[in-house]
Image (spheres, coloured by chain):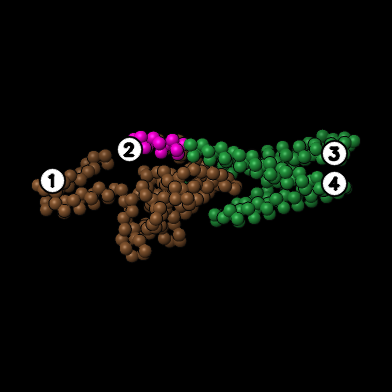
Chain colours: A brown, B green
Amino acid sequence: MKVEIRQVDTPEKEQVVLECMEMTKEFEDIRDYASAKGECLSGYKDGRELYRIRRRDILYVEAVGELVFAYARNQVVELKMRLYEAEELLKQDRFVRCSKSILVNLLKIEWIKPALNGRFCAHMVNEEEIIISRQYAKDVKRYIMEDLV
Amino acid sequence: MRRQTESGKDYAKSILLEFILIQAGVTLAMGIIGTMFARDIAPGYPILFVPFVFAGIGVLPGILLNSRKELTVRQLAMRKVLHLLLMEGIVLGINYMTGALFRVEIVVGLVISVLLIYIFVSAVQLLYDKRSADKMTARLQEYREKEGELNV
Protein backbone atom coordinates (compact mmCIF):
# COMPACT_ATOMS: atom_id res chain seq x y z
CA MET A 1 0.00 0.00 0.00
CA LYS A 2 1.34 3.39 -0.95
CA VAL A 3 1.76 5.82 1.96
CA GLU A 4 1.97 9.55 1.39
CA ILE A 5 2.69 12.09 4.13
CA ARG A 6 2.15 15.82 3.72
CA GLN A 7 3.23 18.28 6.39
CA VAL A 8 0.73 20.96 7.44
CA ASP A 9 1.24 24.12 9.43
CA THR A 10 -1.61 24.01 11.97
CA PRO A 11 -3.07 21.23 14.17
CA GLU A 12 -6.53 21.93 12.77
CA LYS A 13 -5.43 20.76 9.32
CA GLU A 14 -4.16 17.42 10.57
CA GLN A 15 -6.16 14.55 9.16
CA VAL A 16 -5.89 11.08 7.70
CA VAL A 17 -7.35 10.61 4.19
CA LEU A 18 -8.05 7.09 2.96
CA GLU A 19 -8.28 6.61 -0.81
CA CYS A 20 -9.65 3.19 -1.69
CA MET A 21 -11.63 1.42 -4.37
CA GLU A 22 -13.59 -0.51 -1.82
CA MET A 23 -13.98 -0.23 1.95
CA THR A 24 -12.37 -3.48 2.97
CA LYS A 25 -11.81 -4.74 6.47
CA GLU A 26 -8.24 -3.49 6.31
CA PHE A 27 -9.35 0.05 5.53
CA GLU A 28 -12.04 -0.13 8.20
CA ASP A 29 -9.40 -1.07 10.75
CA ILE A 30 -7.19 1.80 9.65
CA ARG A 31 -10.18 4.14 9.79
CA ASP A 32 -11.13 2.99 13.30
CA TYR A 33 -7.57 3.23 14.52
CA ALA A 34 -7.10 6.75 13.13
CA SER A 35 -10.47 7.87 14.56
CA ALA A 36 -9.70 6.53 17.98
CA LYS A 37 -6.07 7.61 18.13
CA GLY A 38 -6.76 11.18 19.20
CA GLU A 39 -9.51 10.15 21.60
CA CYS A 40 -7.77 7.40 23.51
CA LEU A 41 -4.90 6.80 25.83
CA SER A 42 -2.98 3.54 25.80
CA GLY A 43 -2.33 1.64 28.96
CA TYR A 44 -2.36 -1.75 30.59
CA LYS A 45 -5.24 -3.52 32.21
CA ASP A 46 -4.51 -6.07 34.93
CA GLY A 47 -0.83 -5.37 34.49
CA ARG A 48 -0.36 -7.08 31.15
CA GLU A 49 -3.19 -6.61 28.70
CA LEU A 50 -2.71 -3.62 26.38
CA TYR A 51 -5.80 -1.46 26.50
CA ARG A 52 -7.04 1.77 24.99
CA ILE A 53 -9.25 3.94 27.15
CA ARG A 54 -11.24 6.86 25.78
CA ARG A 55 -10.23 10.15 27.29
CA ARG A 56 -13.81 11.23 27.80
CA ASP A 57 -14.50 8.08 29.82
CA ILE A 58 -11.74 8.82 32.34
CA LEU A 59 -13.04 10.21 35.64
CA TYR A 60 -9.67 10.95 37.16
CA VAL A 61 -6.01 10.03 36.91
CA GLU A 62 -4.09 9.18 40.03
CA ALA A 63 -0.42 8.68 40.74
CA VAL A 64 0.25 5.95 43.29
CA GLY A 65 3.94 5.81 44.01
CA GLU A 66 5.71 5.44 40.69
CA LEU A 67 2.57 4.22 38.90
CA VAL A 68 -0.16 6.26 37.23
CA PHE A 69 -3.71 4.96 36.84
CA ALA A 70 -6.68 6.22 34.86
CA TYR A 71 -10.04 5.47 36.46
CA ALA A 72 -13.22 5.15 34.41
CA ARG A 73 -16.61 4.02 35.73
CA ASN A 74 -15.90 0.30 35.58
CA GLN A 75 -12.24 -0.03 34.82
CA VAL A 76 -8.79 0.98 35.86
CA VAL A 77 -5.96 1.28 33.38
CA GLU A 78 -2.32 1.79 34.20
CA LEU A 79 -0.84 4.51 32.04
CA LYS A 80 2.79 4.27 31.12
CA MET A 81 3.59 7.89 31.75
CA ARG A 82 4.24 10.29 34.57
CA LEU A 83 1.43 12.35 36.05
CA TYR A 84 2.75 15.62 34.65
CA GLU A 85 2.81 14.04 31.18
CA ALA A 86 -0.80 12.94 31.59
CA GLU A 87 -1.64 16.45 32.75
CA GLU A 88 -0.15 17.92 29.60
CA LEU A 89 -1.93 15.40 27.36
CA LEU A 90 -5.31 15.81 29.02
CA LYS A 91 -5.29 19.58 29.40
CA GLN A 92 -7.56 20.02 26.37
CA ASP A 93 -10.03 17.49 27.76
CA ARG A 94 -10.81 19.60 30.84
CA PHE A 95 -8.60 17.71 33.25
CA VAL A 96 -7.15 19.76 36.07
CA ARG A 97 -4.76 18.97 38.94
CA CYS A 98 -6.79 18.92 42.15
CA SER A 99 -4.15 17.54 44.48
CA LYS A 100 -0.55 16.47 44.44
CA SER A 101 -1.41 13.10 42.95
CA ILE A 102 -4.74 13.47 41.15
CA LEU A 103 -5.97 14.98 37.89
CA VAL A 104 -9.73 15.22 37.80
CA ASN A 105 -12.00 15.40 34.77
CA LEU A 106 -14.14 18.46 35.43
CA LEU A 107 -16.84 17.19 33.11
CA LYS A 108 -17.32 14.14 35.31
CA ILE A 109 -17.94 16.12 38.50
CA GLU A 110 -21.60 16.18 39.52
CA TRP A 111 -21.25 18.67 42.33
CA ILE A 112 -18.72 20.20 44.69
CA LYS A 113 -19.05 20.74 48.43
CA PRO A 114 -16.73 22.25 51.03
CA ALA A 115 -14.60 19.96 53.17
CA LEU A 116 -12.61 20.93 56.27
CA ASN A 117 -9.83 23.49 56.30
CA GLY A 118 -10.25 25.16 52.92
CA ARG A 119 -10.50 21.90 50.98
CA PHE A 120 -13.33 20.86 48.69
CA CYS A 121 -14.89 17.53 47.86
CA ALA A 122 -15.81 16.73 44.26
CA HIS A 123 -18.64 14.24 43.92
CA MET A 124 -18.08 12.26 40.72
CA VAL A 125 -20.68 10.70 38.40
CA ASN A 126 -19.82 7.22 39.73
CA GLU A 127 -20.53 8.35 43.33
CA GLU A 128 -16.83 8.53 44.24
CA GLU A 129 -15.57 11.59 46.05
CA ILE A 130 -12.28 13.25 45.19
CA ILE A 131 -10.64 15.75 47.50
CA ILE A 132 -9.58 19.08 46.01
CA SER A 133 -6.75 20.05 48.30
CA ARG A 134 -6.30 23.51 49.72
CA GLN A 135 -3.15 24.14 47.65
CA TYR A 136 -4.99 23.53 44.40
CA ALA A 137 -8.47 24.78 45.30
CA LYS A 138 -7.80 28.30 44.07
CA ASP A 139 -6.47 27.12 40.70
CA VAL A 140 -9.40 24.73 40.25
CA LYS A 141 -11.87 27.48 41.07
CA ARG A 142 -10.18 29.94 38.72
CA TYR A 143 -10.18 27.34 35.94
CA ILE A 144 -13.87 26.56 36.39
CA MET A 145 -14.98 30.17 36.72
CA GLU A 146 -12.72 31.78 34.11
CA ASP A 147 -11.12 29.28 31.75
CA LEU A 148 -14.02 26.88 31.13
CA VAL A 149 -15.49 28.27 27.93
CA MET B 1 5.28 25.04 36.21
CA ARG B 2 2.32 24.55 38.52
CA ARG B 3 2.78 25.69 42.09
CA GLN B 4 3.14 22.76 44.45
CA THR B 5 2.25 24.75 47.56
CA GLU B 6 -0.24 27.46 48.41
CA SER B 7 1.28 30.82 47.51
CA GLY B 8 2.56 33.04 50.33
CA LYS B 9 0.02 35.68 49.40
CA ASP B 10 -2.92 33.27 49.69
CA TYR B 11 -1.64 31.91 52.99
CA ALA B 12 -1.19 35.46 54.36
CA LYS B 13 -4.77 36.28 53.31
CA SER B 14 -6.19 33.29 55.13
CA ILE B 15 -4.14 34.08 58.25
CA LEU B 16 -5.32 37.70 58.14
CA LEU B 17 -8.96 36.65 57.84
CA GLU B 18 -8.56 34.31 60.78
CA PHE B 19 -6.84 37.09 62.77
CA ILE B 20 -9.72 39.51 62.14
CA LEU B 21 -12.38 36.94 63.01
CA ILE B 22 -10.64 35.92 66.24
CA GLN B 23 -10.16 39.55 67.20
CA ALA B 24 -13.86 40.30 66.62
CA GLY B 25 -14.87 37.25 68.62
CA VAL B 26 -12.52 38.04 71.51
CA THR B 27 -13.76 41.65 71.68
CA LEU B 28 -17.33 40.42 71.86
CA ALA B 29 -16.48 37.79 74.48
CA MET B 30 -14.63 40.33 76.63
CA GLY B 31 -17.60 42.66 76.44
CA ILE B 32 -20.02 39.93 77.48
CA ILE B 33 -17.86 38.45 80.25
CA GLY B 34 -16.93 41.88 81.58
CA THR B 35 -20.56 42.96 81.64
CA MET B 36 -21.62 39.78 83.41
CA PHE B 37 -18.85 39.46 86.01
CA ALA B 38 -17.01 42.75 86.34
CA ARG B 39 -19.56 45.40 85.54
CA ASP B 40 -18.21 47.85 88.14
CA ILE B 41 -14.61 47.68 86.96
CA ALA B 42 -13.61 50.47 84.55
CA PRO B 43 -10.70 49.13 82.48
CA GLY B 44 -8.30 51.58 80.88
CA TYR B 45 -7.39 52.06 77.22
CA PRO B 46 -4.69 49.34 77.28
CA ILE B 47 -7.41 46.70 77.42
CA LEU B 48 -8.32 47.60 73.82
CA PHE B 49 -5.06 45.96 72.73
CA VAL B 50 -5.96 42.63 74.36
CA PRO B 51 -8.06 41.33 71.40
CA PHE B 52 -5.14 42.04 69.07
CA VAL B 53 -2.78 40.11 71.33
CA PHE B 54 -5.14 37.16 71.62
CA ALA B 55 -5.76 37.14 67.88
CA GLY B 56 -2.03 37.25 67.20
CA ILE B 57 -1.44 34.33 69.53
CA GLY B 58 -4.59 32.59 68.33
CA VAL B 59 -3.43 32.23 64.72
CA LEU B 60 -0.16 30.53 65.74
CA PRO B 61 -1.66 27.11 66.55
CA GLY B 62 -2.92 27.09 62.96
CA ILE B 63 0.46 25.55 62.14
CA LEU B 64 -1.06 22.31 63.49
CA LEU B 65 -3.48 22.25 60.58
CA ASN B 66 -0.82 22.50 57.89
CA SER B 67 0.71 19.36 56.54
CA ARG B 68 2.89 18.45 53.58
CA LYS B 69 0.88 15.23 53.21
CA GLU B 70 -2.78 15.22 52.25
CA LEU B 71 -4.65 14.52 55.50
CA THR B 72 -7.77 12.38 55.63
CA VAL B 73 -10.99 13.90 56.95
CA ARG B 74 -10.52 11.99 60.20
CA GLN B 75 -6.92 13.14 60.65
CA LEU B 76 -7.94 16.71 59.95
CA ALA B 77 -10.84 16.53 62.40
CA MET B 78 -8.47 15.25 65.11
CA ARG B 79 -6.06 18.08 64.40
CA LYS B 80 -8.94 20.56 64.66
CA VAL B 81 -9.80 19.20 68.11
CA LEU B 82 -6.16 19.52 69.20
CA HIS B 83 -6.12 23.01 67.72
CA LEU B 84 -9.13 23.96 69.83
CA LEU B 85 -7.64 22.48 72.99
CA LEU B 86 -4.42 24.37 72.35
CA MET B 87 -6.35 27.62 71.94
CA GLU B 88 -8.20 26.97 75.19
CA GLY B 89 -4.90 26.30 76.93
CA ILE B 90 -3.31 29.48 75.59
CA VAL B 91 -6.24 31.71 76.57
CA LEU B 92 -6.57 30.23 80.04
CA GLY B 93 -2.80 30.33 80.51
CA ILE B 94 -2.54 34.02 79.61
CA ASN B 95 -5.48 34.91 81.84
CA TYR B 96 -4.00 32.88 84.69
CA MET B 97 -0.68 34.69 84.38
CA THR B 98 -2.43 38.08 84.52
CA GLY B 99 -4.44 37.02 87.56
CA ALA B 100 -7.77 37.33 85.78
CA LEU B 101 -8.99 33.85 86.72
CA PHE B 102 -10.21 34.79 90.15
CA ARG B 103 -13.63 33.18 89.84
CA VAL B 104 -14.75 29.79 88.52
CA GLU B 105 -17.46 31.46 86.47
CA ILE B 106 -14.82 33.43 84.60
CA VAL B 107 -12.94 30.24 83.74
CA VAL B 108 -16.14 28.61 82.50
CA GLY B 109 -17.05 31.78 80.63
CA LEU B 110 -13.65 31.86 78.94
CA VAL B 111 -13.76 28.18 77.96
CA ILE B 112 -17.21 28.62 76.44
CA SER B 113 -16.17 31.86 74.73
CA VAL B 114 -13.14 30.26 73.09
CA LEU B 115 -15.30 27.36 71.93
CA LEU B 116 -17.94 29.71 70.52
CA ILE B 117 -15.34 31.88 68.80
CA TYR B 118 -13.76 28.77 67.32
CA ILE B 119 -17.13 27.59 66.03
CA PHE B 120 -17.87 31.10 64.73
CA VAL B 121 -14.59 31.31 62.80
CA SER B 122 -15.04 27.79 61.40
CA ALA B 123 -18.64 28.53 60.45
CA VAL B 124 -17.72 31.73 58.58
CA GLN B 125 -15.00 29.90 56.68
CA LEU B 126 -17.34 27.04 55.89
CA LEU B 127 -20.06 29.41 54.65
CA TYR B 128 -17.57 31.19 52.43
CA ASP B 129 -16.38 27.86 51.04
CA LYS B 130 -19.97 26.69 50.54
CA ARG B 131 -20.63 29.76 48.45
CA SER B 132 -17.56 29.01 46.32
CA ALA B 133 -18.56 25.37 45.96
CA ASP B 134 -22.09 26.28 44.84
CA LYS B 135 -20.72 28.73 42.27
CA MET B 136 -18.37 26.11 40.86
CA THR B 137 -21.14 23.50 40.71
CA ALA B 138 -23.44 25.93 38.88
CA ARG B 139 -20.69 26.84 36.42
CA LEU B 140 -19.92 23.18 35.70
CA GLN B 141 -23.61 22.44 35.18
CA GLU B 142 -23.91 25.40 32.81
CA TYR B 143 -20.87 24.24 30.85
CA ARG B 144 -22.16 20.67 30.57
CA GLU B 145 -25.52 21.91 29.27
CA LYS B 146 -23.79 24.13 26.75
CA GLU B 147 -21.57 21.25 25.59
CA GLY B 148 -24.67 19.12 25.29
CA GLU B 149 -26.20 21.74 22.99
CA LEU B 150 -23.07 21.92 20.87
CA ASN B 151 -22.89 18.16 20.52
CA VAL B 152 -26.48 17.75 19.27
Label 1, label 2: how many angstroms apart (C-alpha)? Answer: 28 Å
Circle 3 SS class:
helix
The magenta stretch spans which residues?
Answer: B139-150
* Depth order, front residue of A22/B105: A22
Chain for disc number 4: B
Q: Is residue B151 above or below residue A76?
A: above
Residue B40 percent location from the top left of the image: 90, 35
Q: Any mark on residue A1, and which?
A: none
Q: Any mark on residue B105, and which?
A: 4
Q: Using the rendered view, name the quadrant where residue B71 is placed.
A: bottom right
Q: Is label 4 in contact with label 3 (beta carbons under 8 Å)?
A: yes
Residue, disc 1: A19
> Which label's residue is closer to the chain start, 2 or 3?
3
Residue, disc 3: B36
Q: Using the rendered view, name the quadrant where residue B8 is placed.
A: top right
Q: Residues within 10 Å of mark 4 (few under 14, many from 20)?
A: few
